[in-house]
Image: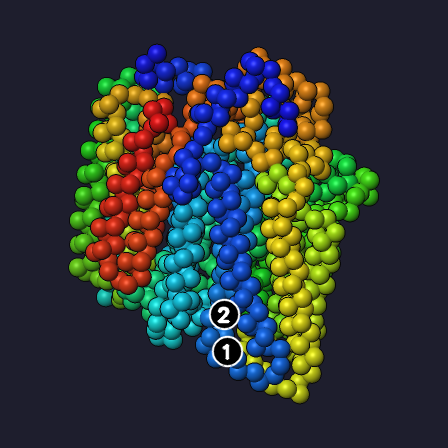
Amino acid sequence: MSAATEAVAVERRRVAHPNGWWGIAIFCASEAMLFGLLLATYYYLRFRATQWPPPGVPEPKVALPLILTAVLVSSSVPVALAARAARAGRVRVAQVALAVALAAQATYFGLQIHLFLDDLAKFTPQQGAYGSAYYTLVGAHHTHVAVGLLLDAWLLLRLAGGLTTYRVNGLLATAFYWHFVNALAVLVVLTQVSPSL
Amino acid sequence: MAAIDVLPPRARERVDRLERIWAERPGLLGWLTTVDHKRIGLLYFFTSLAFFGAGGVEALLMRTQLAAPNSHLLSPNAYDQAMTMHGITMIFLFVIPMTTGAFGNYLVPLMIGARDMAFPRLNALGFWLFLGSGLFIYSAVFAGIAPDAGWFDYVPLALRRFDPGLNIDFYALGLIFNGVASTLASINFIATIFKLRAPGMSLNRMPLFCFAILAVSFSLVFALPALTLDCVLLELQRRLQFHFFDVGGGGSPLLWQHLFWFFGHPEVYIIVLPAFGIATSIIPTFAKHRMIAFPLVAIAELLVAFIGFGVWAHHMFATGLPLATLVIFAAASMLVVIPSTIQIFAWTATVMMGRPEFRAPLLFIGGFITFFVIGGLSGIMFAAIPFDQATTDTYFVVAHFHFIIFGAAVFPILGGMYYWFPKVTGRMYNEPVAQASFWLSFVGTSLTFFPMHVVGLLGMPRRVYTYDSGLGWDAYNLSETVGAFLLTAGLLLIFGNLVWGRFRGAYAGSDPFFGGTLEWATTSPPPPYNFAVIPKVTSPYPNWDRQDRTEDRPRLEEGVLTLETGHETPASTVIDGALDEIVRMPSESIWPFALALFVALVFVALLFAHYAVAGFLAVAALLAVAAWNAEEPETA
C-alpha cells in the first residue's frame, strides 16, 4: 500500500479528530488568549485617555484595511478546499487550492506591510500609549500571518513529494491555523479602525 | 511482571520484537535525542531538583540574614536578587517542571495505558527549552545581575529608569522563553490525555491524577499568554521606549499588575493542582479504598482551575480599584472554597472509609491536608477586603502562601517521590527513615512558616532585607530560621533515603503497594514501550480488576493490541475512549535539541540587543523546524 492510499484509508476510518488537530486547536486557544489580552490592553489604555488618538496623530484609515481583511478572510475558502482535497487523496487539487490561498494571503501581507511602514512615517510607537498599543496589536497580527505564509510554502514543498498521513495532518493543522488567524483579523481590524468609525 | 522471563515462546517473540523497535541509542547521545516520555521525565526530575537546591540556598540565605535584627550578611541589592530568584526558581524552575514535567511526563502515559506522549518530539523540545530558559535566567545569578524587582516585577520599579541594568531583561526574556516551554508541554498533555487513553478508558474511568494534569495544562495554556504579553510589553517599553506602563506617556502601572495577576492567580492553582492529583493517587492505594465521590473530585479539580481565572484582582485590593470591582472579586475568591472543600472532604472520607496504612507517602498527604487547611483558612481571610488591606505586604501574606505553595504543593511532591520511587527504580526506600524524614520536614515547615503569621500581624513588612530590634519580632524570626534549617535537614534526609534506595534498597517488584492505576500493571522500571500488550480497561482502578489483568497474558500470546510491527500506539475517541486508529509515533531525533539550542541563542542575542544576529539565529531555528518536519514518523 502506497503512502498516499494509506493516508486516505486512515482519513476514512478515523471518527475522532487526529492528534495533530488537537495540538493546533489548543495552540490556537492559547493564541486567542494572547490576542484577547492584547485587545484588552488596547481598550484599557484607550478608556484612560482623554483623546484617542492623541492630538497630532492622524485617525486610522478605514476603507483599505477593511478591504484587505475581506481578501484575507476569503482565503479561508481555498484553504478549506485544500484540506478537503488532501483528505480525499487528490493531491493536485490540494496543491492548486493551497497555492491560490498563498497568493491571496501574500498579497494581503505585502500591502499590510506597506501600510504599516506608511503609518510609521506619520507617527511612532514612542509618541505615546496610542502608538504603542496600535503598532503592537497590528504587528502581532502581521507576525501571525507571516507564520501562516511560511507554513503554506513549506506544505507546498512537501506535497510536491506526494501525500502521507503526516502531511495530511499537517495540512489540516495549517487550515485550522488559517481559519483562526482570519477570524482574529476581523477583531484586530475592527479595533484598529474603531477610532475613525 | 517478574514472570516476563518465563513467557511462552509466542509471547516472548512479540516482546523481543517490541524491545528491538523501541530501543533507543545508548550513552549521552541517547539522552540528547530521546523521545521516551520516561527518560524525558527523569531529565525534568533531575533538572528541576537542581533548581530546587538553588532556590533552597536562596531561601536559606534570606533566613540567615533575617535570623537576627540589623544583620548585613547580604547587601540590600543581594537580598533583593536572592528574594526575586527564590520566587522565580521555585515557581517556574521547580514546581511546574517537577509536577508536570517530571511526574506528569513519567506517569500520564503509564496511567492511561499509552506507549508515549501524543507528540514525543515536542515533548523533548519542551524539556530542552525549559533547561535553556533555566540556564539563561541563572546565568544572570552568576554574573551578579539577577532580576531584583521581586518575582511579581512591579513597574515602575522594573522600568529602565529605576533598574537600568540587564537584571529585568533577564527576567522578562527568561520568562517568555520559559513560557514557550510550558505551553508546548501543556498542549502535549491535553492531546495525550484526550487521545491516547487505552481503549475502554472513557473519561469517567480516567485516573484523577490525569484530571489534575488536564486542569493544570488548560490553566497554563490560558494563563501563560498574559505573562508572556506582559513581559513583551515590558521589553518594548524598556528597550524601544514604547509607553504602556508610564503615566506620562499615557500608560498605566496598574496594567502590569492586571496582566501579571491574570496569569499569577491561575498560577497558584497550577502549582497546587498536581498536588491534588498526587493526593488522589496515594490515598486510595494506602486506604485500600476507591476515592469517594470520584466524579465530584474530578469536576472539583477542573472547577478550581476555572474559578482561578476570575479572582486575580484580589492581589490588588490595596491598589485603589473601585469598590464595586473589589466586592465582585472578593465574592469570586470565596467561591474557591467550594471545590477545595469538596476535595478535602473526599480525601478524609476515603481515608476514614478504608483501612489506612500510614506509610511515608500517606503521611506526607496527611501533612499536605493539614497545611492546605491552614493556608486555606488564611486565604479566606484575605478574601475579606478590610482584612486584606490591613495585612497586605506583611509577613502574614508570606505565611499564607507558603502554607499553600510549600506545605500544600511540595509535601505531595515529596510523598509522590516516595510513592513512585519503586516504580521508577525497581527498588524500595527505607520506610522508618522515610517516616522520620516526614516528621522532620513537618516540624520544620510548621516552625518556619507559622510564626510568620504572628510577626505579620505584629506589623513586620515583607520583602525587607533587615529590621530593627526592639519591635518584638526577634524571637519569631529566629525560630523561623531554625525551622528553615530543620526543614532542610528533613529534605536532605529524603534525598539521602532515595539515593540509598536506588543502590541498596530491596527489590520492589512491579506493584509493591497494590496500587489501582495502570502504572502498577507493568514492570518496575517500565520497559521503553510501557506495556507489552495495551491493557484492557473497564473501571477507574483497572489494576484492581483481577479478571482484566489475568487476561493480559493470553492477549499478549494472541497478539491482541501488541502493535509489534512499528513504533505505534492506539488512539481513542475523546469521551468514550473507543479504539479509533493506530498512530505511528516518531522515534528519537536530534532536532528538538538543535531547535532548543537555536532558540536559546536567539534569546541571548535579544538580551544583548543584537537584533540582526537574533534574526539570523531565528532563521537557523526555522531551518531546524523544517529538518524536524521532513523526518516523518512513517519513514523514521
Host chain of mark 2: B
Query: Looking at the image, is B131 positioned above or below residue B508?
Result: below
Q: Residue furthest front?
A: B504
The percent coordinates of residue A75 (x first, y second) are 27, 32
Identify the image quadrant of residue B614: bottom left
Side of B615 relative to B250 (left or right)? left
Callout 2: helix, strand or loop? helix
Chain ID, mark 1:
B
The single residue placed furthest to the bottom in the displayed view is B470
Q: Work out whether residue B489 or residue A127 is closer to the camera in this orientation and state it.
A: B489
Q: Position of residue B243 (x, y in %)?
A: 33, 66
Residue closest to the eye, B73 or B212: B73
Graded by Cα atoms within 10 Å as few (under 14), some (14 to 19) or many (20 or more), the crowding at tag 2 reads: many
The correct choice, above or below, for B422 with respect to B133 in the image is: above
Q: Nearer the viewer, residue B328 or B533?
A: B533
Near mark 1 (Cα within 10 A), the count class, few <14, some 14-19 or many ≥20, is some
Circle 2: residue type: Ala
Q: Position of residue B113 (x, y in %)?
A: 57, 29
Q: Is residue B580 visible?
A: no
Identify residue for label 2: B82
Where residue B595 sits in the image (x, y, percent)?
33, 44
Question: What residue is at 57 percent from the left and 38 percent from the top?
Answer: B107
Amino acid type at image mark 1: Leu
Residue, disc 1: B74
Residue at x 56%, y 14% (from the top left corner): B9
Query: Are labels 1 and 2 assigned to the same chain?
Result: yes
> N-terminal of the two: label 1 or label 2?
1
Q: Are marks 1 and 2 in contact (CB under 8 Å)?
A: yes
Which image quarter: residue B349?
top right
- Residue shown at the point (26%, 25%) measured from the top left: A159
Q: Looking at the image, is A18 positioned above or below residue B138?
A: above
Rounded to the nearest angstrom, the CA distance separating label 1 from label 2 is 9 Å
